[in-house]
Amino acid sequence: MGGLFQRNVLVAAAVCCSVLVPSVLGSPVLAQEPIRCAPCSPEKMSECPAVAPGCAEVLQEPGCGCCLACALKTGDLCGIYTAPCGSRLRCTPRPGDLRPLHSLTRGQAVCTEIPEPERSPVPQNPDQGEVDNAETENAAMVSDPGSSLYLPGHSKPFDPRAAADAQESMKAKVNAIRKKLVEQCESSLDGQKGSV
């Protein structure tokens, strides 16, 4: 009877170590590193196709591309695998498109102009001008989609130090979970090695 219990404990410990630990260690959610593009070497640049001579605007390929491409104009079809839209243009699905992601992945979206953010009028009262002007600048910065200080869809400024602190905190939590699981597996295997 004692041997059966030891065998069950050994099987449970093996399952713990083989299933739980790799799932935490290899989880794409917990400790995934950001994608870093490889530098563009002269060899890669020499393999790039020539850009058409009549091109009005030349931009680098999207993503990690090293080659230059002729920028698309307003109304041209675009997508995530096509040449980039020109300056002040954005690749967006057509209005009313039932499958916008499908359009973007199939190159069926359209290059459209980025609307200018509306600026609030400057106050007329000189006494309140300094205070209100600072508020107006902050409001304009929040609504500006190209602002590097604010993330799209958020009203709080992006603070790289806070992001780094949050990332370090997540790493510490992942390491603590990983260490706890490994210790649990090792403690359940103590004294069980070699017994079948």
Image: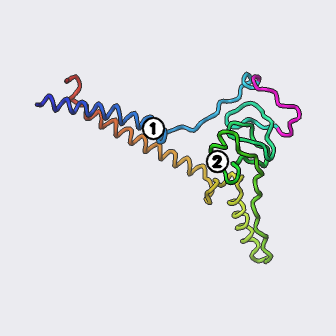
SS for callout 1: loop
Up the image or down, 139 lies above or below 40; here it is: below
Tags 1 and 2 in contact by the CB under 8 Å rule?
A: no
Q: Main structural element of the magenta stretch: helix, strand or loop?
A: loop
Label 2 element class: helix
First in sequence, mark 1 or 2: give its number.
1
Q: Which residue is mark 2?
A: 100
The quarter of the picture where the C terminus appears is top left
Query: Is residue 54 a member of the stretch shown in magenta?
Result: yes
Return the x and y of residue 152 as percentages of the image width and height. Answer: 64, 54
- Say left or right for 145 vs 125: left
Q: Residue at x 43, y 45 (%)?
A: 173
The part of the chain drawn in magenta is 46-57
Give the image location of residue 190, x and y in percent: 24, 31
Disc tally is 2
Tag 2: residue type?
Pro
Give the residue type at disc 1. Answer: Ser
Say if 10 sits above or below 106 in the image: above
Coloured how? rainbow
Q: Which residue does the image show at 70% across and 48% down from the upper left? A: 92
Residue pictured at 75% horizontal, 71% vertical: 130
